[in-house]
Amino acid sequence: GEDVEQSLFLSVREGDSSVINCTYTDSSSTYLYWYKQEPGAGLQLLTYIFSNMDMKQDQRLTVLLNKKDKHLSLRIADTQTGDSAIYFCAESRDGGFKTIFGAGTRLFVKA
Amino acid sequence: NAGVTQTPKFRVLKTGQSMTLLCAQDMNHEYMYWYRQDPGMGLRLIHYSVGEGTTAKGEVPDGYNVSRLKKQNFLLGLESAAPSQTSVYFCASSQLDRVYNEQFFGPGTRLTVL
């Protein structure tokens, strides 16, 4: 996962917005993903963005993609305690069937 | 549908012992993966399979072997466990749709090697 970089921790207050940032390396990646891992569980796909898009919005989630800088971000509006989890950024490689994961950002939400 | 299941959930081994982790999926997916998750390092790919009877090495394959004799099962073997293999192991499966590849993960196996 060293080719996909993200900060390890983020702490926010309930009701605030959370922004999790990620940088990736492969400019040919066609899809970029955000996975969520809740305590004691496996990863689950949260959202994704196709490389020809700059932004994708899905309810409280906004994904921004800057291909020039190879920068991806995930914004969670009105963050709730139930959003506390580890969020993994991931990029597709080798025609799509390989996925490279970042180290994960642990989001703490304070009540 | 059960999705992706893994057995066992927890295991403690002594150095040099062997064990097999079993992954099963009921989604008829072609692709299956084994990852290990270590603190601060995210997920690292150990081995993967693009179909029944095929396997390939990932990023960290040393000390592990795999087999995919049936499409729905992917086995990960440790022949002689070492403390460095203490980790949480995740299995995943997917069905590649052109280049879109959502992976479905099992709940993980926590392995401790003493």
Image (cartoon, coloured by chain):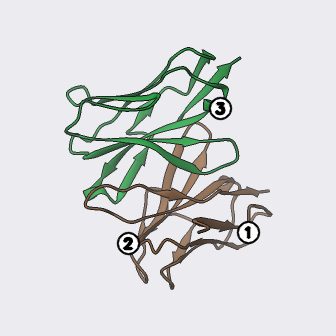
Residue receiving disc 3: A82
Q: Residue at x 74, y 61 (%)?
A: B9
Report crowding for label 2: few under 14, some 14 to 19, many 20 or more residues within 10 A (C-alpha): many
Number of the front mark, 3 or 2:
3
Residue ranking furthest to the front: A59
Element class at badge 2 = loop
Number of the front mark, 1 or 2:
2
Chain ID, mark 3: A
Residue receiving disc 1: B16
Spatial CA span between label 3 and label 2: 35 Å
Residue type, label 3:
Gly
Q: Residue at x 44, y 31 (%)?
A: A59
Q: Residue at x 70, y 47 (%)?
A: A40
Q: Earlier in the sequence, mark 1 or mark 2?
A: 1
Does residue A103 show up? no
Q: Colour of chain A?
A: green
Q: Position of residue B42 (x, y in %)?
A: 53, 42
Q: Nearer the viewer, residue B79 or A17?
A: A17
Choose top left, top right, bottom left or bottom right for residue A70.
Answer: top left
Q: Is residue A26 above or below residue B67?
A: above
Residue type, label 2:
Val
Residue receiving disc 2: B50
Chain ID, mark 2: B
